[in-house]
Image: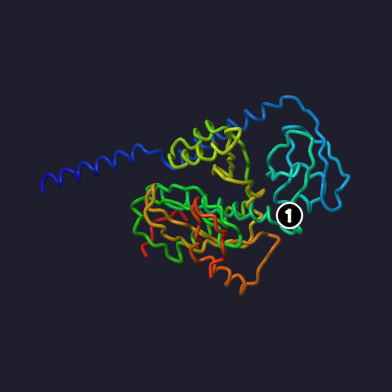
Amino acid sequence: MVTRTVCQVFQHRFASSAAALRPSPAEVCSQRNAVFSREQARQRALYPRVEKIEVSMQGPGLVGTTLIMNRGMSTPLSCARHLTEHHMNSSALALVDGEPWPLHKPLTHSCSLTLLTFKDSDPTLVNQAYWRSCAALLGQVLETAFKDDYTVELLSTPEVPVISGAFCCDVVLDAQLDSWTPSEESLRSLTRGAQQLIHQDLAWEPLEVTSSVALEVFSHSRCKQEEVEQKASQSPKDTVMLYRCGDHVLLTGGPLVARTGLCSQYEVTALHSLGQGPWGHHRRAQGLSLPLQLQAHHTVWRKLRQRAEKLVDVPGPEEVKPPSPPDSVQPPTNQ
């Protein structure tokens, strides 16, 4: 009995020491931002002189339009500003020589450019980027929703199609919250956090970096470091794509839309338990959203929301079947 008590005392002291040594969320955020800004400045310095490139615009009413832009500085959004206010406000993504290209990513060579919107005849690429962006927004909210006493570890974001009914963000919360079941008020609090970011109309700034830089960005997260190594191993250039939204730096597997303000109706619908995993108690946060250019009547939204509450089943890497549509203690928060 005495031995057990002594062990419990040492375990408690060790846990307290580990918590004291762990950097605060604000310190982690500051470090990630500093590395991101440093690398962004280094890449911009690669173009010390202004060099002109020709950008051949494609799309309805734009064929034959050529813009003279600055290499390494001008972005697809810069090109949209030379056209009309409609192009600037409605564009969500771009195609550069046929390849998906974030609106805030600098152009590095003469190219053809197509601005993509949610109302294109084939909005598949934009819809995928939008769904991915909504999941990124949810992850950002989760990282800041709890007090500093609780750790939040974002896992690799599942790539799910729009027809799945909900976007997803997998997360491991502090072990102190393993028994917590979120209430409806908890979900509403997360929704309010997302809506605040949407109201700020923040840009998703892209930055392609080498794996060594990404590992430094996520030096306080072994989970993210493993994800960096996995994604970099699939890249011929040993690079990964980072984005920054406000002061939040994230890792993504594909392009995001230009800004949070493109989201309109947005709601966090569920936080499901996935059970124990490699990093602890895995959970899947889910949500539903529609972009600014597309609105749903409240009765339609209610039906979509009911569907988005159901757990989205994400096939494992060994599964190749296509996805199909799916038929309380309150912790302290900062909201």
Q: In this view, does 254 lie to the left or right of 220?
A: right
**Which residue sits at x=10%, y=46%?**
2
Q: Which of 177 and 196 is in front in this view?
A: 177
Q: Is residue 261 left or right of residue 184?
A: right
The local crowd at label 1, few if under 14, some if 14 to 19, many if 20 or more residues have their Cα within 10 Å, is many
Helix, strand or loop for disc 1: loop
For residue 250, what is the image quadrant? top right
Q: In this view, does 258 lie above or below 218?
A: below
Residue found at the very far right of the displayed protein: 64
> In the rendering, at what x and y percent does residue 263 appear?
64, 57
Q: Which of 10 and 251 is in front in this view?
A: 251
Residue sticking out furthest to the bottom: 299
Is 221 drawn above or below residue 283 in the view shown?
above
- Position in image of residue 296 (x %, y %): 65, 68
**Residue, far left:** 2
Residue at numbered disc 1: 117
Observer-nearest of 139 and 89: 139
Q: How many labels does the image show?
A: 1
Q: Where residue 254 sits: x, y (%)?
A: 61, 46
Residue 170 appears at what percent x and percent y?
47, 53
Q: What residue type is labelled 1?
A: Thr
State how the image is colored: rainbow
